[in-house]
Image (cartoon, rainbow, N blue to C red):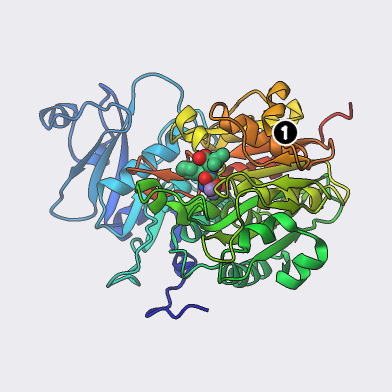
């Protein structure tokens, strides 16, 4: 459709795989060019650091958690003292953060090794968290000169012979999770003109098929036949055609069935309700982060041995102003027959999600989860590190909250307060797509609830967490792909909510 001077690879990080392995301290010292050594506060460091407590103190290193100090050596890998602190539990979240701090402390070293810190996590969980921390911290999205240059060649985790099998199992899981996460980040950061809805479907076919998913792509004619008036309405202003992508992960003897629905607005200009040309407008290539995380998380399910059957829906189009765009006051008929009066074309996410929610209820399913960069109000409420969650089923909401805790992608519940539903009343249709100026995240969720037919459902609003102004530990600056680990963990741990 559009001619672009250079056709970027939308998913560069999937093309180079870092070698991650388990080794003895001697092997690691021989092969690596930087070795991380954990150091407790006020504790004598291990011998291989090559200095003692007084030496560290003279360099101003205190062993505070997350502190790093690079110690040059005449021979062998540079040693990096990594502070683990004095007190407090060392869980997987701490290990992941410390590994990421190490990886960031030696940005030019490409052969890293890390020693195990005595903590409260199992060897396997430690190895997984280290692998995730390093691979996530070293990811970057860059399409300039030297774009093909890998930022990391290898990572070795030091373990005894006895611990090696468990460490290797953890490394394997960490690699699967990090590869999925980095795929989601690639997609979220890829410029919108390069990653159109059509291209997104091509990527889904490529990576979905390679990871054992069934991938079905629905084009505009099929969407018309299916009555997906929300996705089609939003697409009307665009020269790029829409795509709905349905992914299926079908394990033998599934222990439960879930549907995951991702908002895939490839670019959100606001449409006729055009956004101002401010900083947040410039971030709107990330308005497909929900779709990116559904696709990315599903690529990991088979290899992680997930026993939950998962159907994913990616609702992809951009939201553009033009002579053919939706007009304010237009009425759309959604997949389930509900009519919606469009009072603001910038409230487009809920329109595309509505069709998928309705489709998801048409098949047997134990729970539906949708994930969307849905409301600026969620960013205002929670900032950039916590996502919002709302739903009609406390068990599903609680499972999401717990999954977020486990993987360090926190989500916090807002009340789905039903009396606010009247803000969506329309005089000419079943409802409007616009609530009042207050409680925007809640009225958006109340809109979505209309399409789930009373089935157990929760909605995750990642409008705040989809973009970070500065990196922190394993988190990257720019489009974050927040939610991939959350959805993986949710699917792995999913338990059917009690029938009520
Ligand atoms: N994609 C935006 C939400 C968003 C805003 C994400 C800022 C990240 C940062 C969404 O489509 C949108 O425009 N929402 C409107 C809804 C309103 C018009 C009811 C909003 O939040 O302002
Ligand atoms: Mn919008
Ligand atoms: Zn949007």
Residue shown at the point (76%, 29%) measured from the top left? 393
Residue shown at the point (52%, 33%) measured from the top left? 378
Looking at the picture, how far across and down is residue 490, in whole percent?
67, 40
Residue nearest the observer in this picture, 319 or 46: 319
Residue 418 visible here? yes
Question: Which picture quadrant has residue 39?
Answer: top left
Looking at the picture, how far across and down is residue 246, in whole percent?
73, 61
Is residue 309 found left or right of 180 in the rendered image?
right
Looking at the picture, how far across and down is residue 355, in whole percent?
75, 52
Q: Residues within 10 Å of mark 1 (few under 14, many from 20)?
A: some
Residue shown at the point (55%, 38%) measured from the top left? 407
Mark 1 Cβ inside 8 Å of ligand 1: no
Question: Which picture quadrant has residue 27?
Answer: bottom left
Is residue 391 found left or right of 45 in the rendered image?
right
Residue 488 visible here? no
- Residue at image mark 1: 425
Residue nearest the observer in this picture, 223 or 146: 223
Is residue 387 found left or right of 281 in the rendered image?
right
Question: Which picture quadrant has residue 130?
Answer: top left
Q: Residue furthest top?
A: 87
């Amino acid at each position: 459709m559009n001619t672009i001077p250079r056709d970027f690879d939308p998913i560069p990080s999937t093309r180079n795989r870092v070698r991650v392995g388990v080794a003895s301290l001697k092997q690691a010292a021989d092969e690596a060019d930087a070795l991380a050594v954990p150091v407790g506060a006020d504790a004598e460091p291990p011998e291989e650091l090559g200095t003692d407590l007084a030496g560290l103190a003279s360099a101003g290193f205190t062993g505070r958690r997350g502190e790093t100090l690079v110690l040059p050596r005449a021979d062998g890998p540079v040693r990096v003292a990594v502070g683990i602190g004095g007190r407090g539990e060392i869980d997987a979240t701490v290990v992941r953060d410390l590994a990421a701090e190490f990886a960031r402390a030696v940005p030019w070293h490409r052969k890293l090794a890390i020693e195990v810190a005595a903590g409260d996590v199992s060897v396997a969980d430690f190895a997984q968290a280290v692998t995730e921390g390093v691979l996530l911290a070293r990811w970057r999205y860059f399409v300039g000169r030297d774009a093909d240059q890998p930022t990391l060649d290898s990572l070795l985790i030091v373990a005894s012979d006895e611990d090696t099998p468990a460490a290797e199992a953890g490394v394997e899981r960490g690699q699967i999770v990090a590869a999925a996460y980095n795929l989601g980040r690639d997609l979220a950061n890829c410029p919108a003109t390069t990653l159109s809805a059509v291209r997104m479907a091509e990527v889904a076919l490529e990576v979905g098929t390679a990871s054992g998913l069934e991938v079905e792509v629905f084009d505009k004619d099929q969407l018309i036949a299916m009555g997906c008036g929300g996705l089609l309405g939003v697409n009307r202003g665009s020269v790029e055609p829409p795509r709905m992508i349905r992914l299926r992960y079908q394990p033998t003897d599934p222990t439960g069935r879930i549907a995951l629905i991702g908002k895939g607005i490839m670019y959100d200009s606001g449409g006729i309700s055009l956004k101002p040309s401010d900083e947040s407008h410039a971030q709107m290539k990330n308005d497909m982060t929900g779709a990116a995380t559904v696709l990315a998380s599903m690529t990991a399910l088979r290899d992680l041995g997930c026993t939950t059957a998962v159907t994913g829906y990616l609702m992809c189009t951009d939201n553009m102003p033009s002579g053919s765009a939706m007009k304010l006051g237009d009425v759309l008929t959604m997949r389930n027959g509900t009519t919606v009066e469009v009072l603001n074309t910038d409230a487009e996410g809920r329109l595309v999600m509505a069709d998928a929610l309705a489709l998801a209820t048409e098949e047997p399913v134990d729970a539906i989860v949708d994930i969307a960069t849905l409301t600026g109000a969620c960013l205002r409420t929670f900032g950039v590190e916590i996502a919002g969650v709302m739903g009609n089923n406390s068990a599903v909401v609680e499972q999401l909250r717990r999954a977020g805790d486990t993987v360090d992608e926190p989500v916090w519940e807002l009340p789905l307060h039903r009396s606010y539903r009247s803000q969506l009343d329309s005089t000419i249709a079943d409802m409007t797509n616009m609530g009042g100026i207050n409680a925007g995240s809640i009225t958006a969720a109340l809109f979505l609830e209309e399409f789930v037919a009373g089935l157990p459902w929760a909605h995750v609003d990642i409008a705040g967490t989809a973009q970070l102004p500065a990196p922190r530990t394993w988190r990257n600056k720019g489009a974050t792909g927040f939610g991939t680990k959350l959805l993986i963990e949710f699917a792995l741990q999913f338990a059917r909510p009690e029938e009520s």
